[in-house]
Image (tube, rainbow, N blue to C red):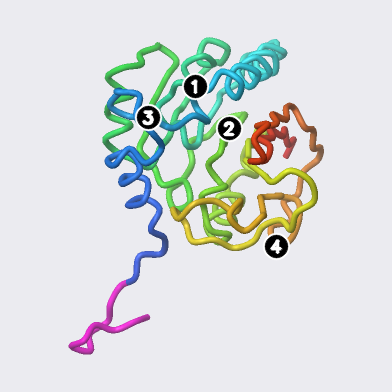
Amino acid sequence: MKKNENGTKKVMKPWPTKEAMEQVYTMKLWGDNKSHFYSGVGSHHPEIIDPYITILRSFLSSFKAPLVVSDLGCGDFNVGKELVKHTKKYVAVDIVADLIDYNKSTFKEENLEFHCLDIAVDQLPSGDCALLRQVLQHLSNTEVQSILNKLTDFKYVILTEHIPEGDFTPNKEIISGQGTRLKKQSGLNLVAPPFNFKVKEEKQLLSVNLNNGKGLIVTTLYEV
């Protein structure tokens, strides 16, 4: 533990994620479409979100008994709002309190809940399926591992990550809230070291080539 100049112990925050994400929305670092909150082109560009919504609707509708879904990092909810009606209950979570308050006042369904949580620190809402869409790519390996330890409570995990095209060294370390692993020509692979996430089955649901040399957005289904 570091000490202040006067010699007293200085309590260090484990991760800067909350402050970083608050800054993203306050300063509109992911762009500005004149709305109160905007989660970037990854949550709005039709070529990215339309195939994702289609494949998720198909997956969620394939069950005789609708699933309880936990959306871990729901952002501005431009994508999540298209999935709610295909679930028994949809619990949407984000780390930014003002964003969650806005979502609560904007999106209202009987089976929809919003919660402000730090998914690396707080207990996750229970459910059948966890969605993490371009969330873990912003987090340090320590935070990713903390989240993975909790995902074993779900039967299904659907992960979407922005990764380099072609071969790359996975899981290079980054500082939370300071970009993604793409700047290191890396991306997440949960079943590779150091995570070695144990799954019963792994299936790629979708891969979107950005066609601009900026890699792929890949969605993978894990049965845990």
* Residue beneath disc 3: 38
Whether tag 1 and tag 4 are in contact, CB under 8 A, the answer is: no
> Residue at horizontal 67%, vertical 44%?
163
Badge 2 amino acid:
Leu
Whether tag 3 and tag 4 are in contact, CB under 8 A, the answer is: no
> Residue at horizontal 54%, vertical 16%?
83
* Residue beneath disc 1: 80
CA–CA distance in space, label 2 to label 4: 22 Å
CA–CA distance in space, label 3 to label 2: 19 Å
Q: Main secondary structure of the magenta part?
A: loop
Q: Quadrant of residue 212?
A: top right
Sequence-first tag of 1 and 3: 3
Expressed as whole percent of the image width and height from the top left, the position of residue 171 reads 67, 57
Is residue 2 one of those drawn in magenta?
yes
* Residue beneath disc 2: 131
Whether tag 1 and tag 2 are in contact, CB under 8 A, the answer is: yes
Q: Which residues are magenta?
A: 1-11
* Residue beneath disc 4: 194
The number of numbered badges drawn on the structure is: 4
Badge 3 amino acid:
Tyr
Badge 4 amino acid:
Pro
**Mark 3 vs mark 4: in front:** 3
Q: Mark 2: which secondary structure?
A: strand
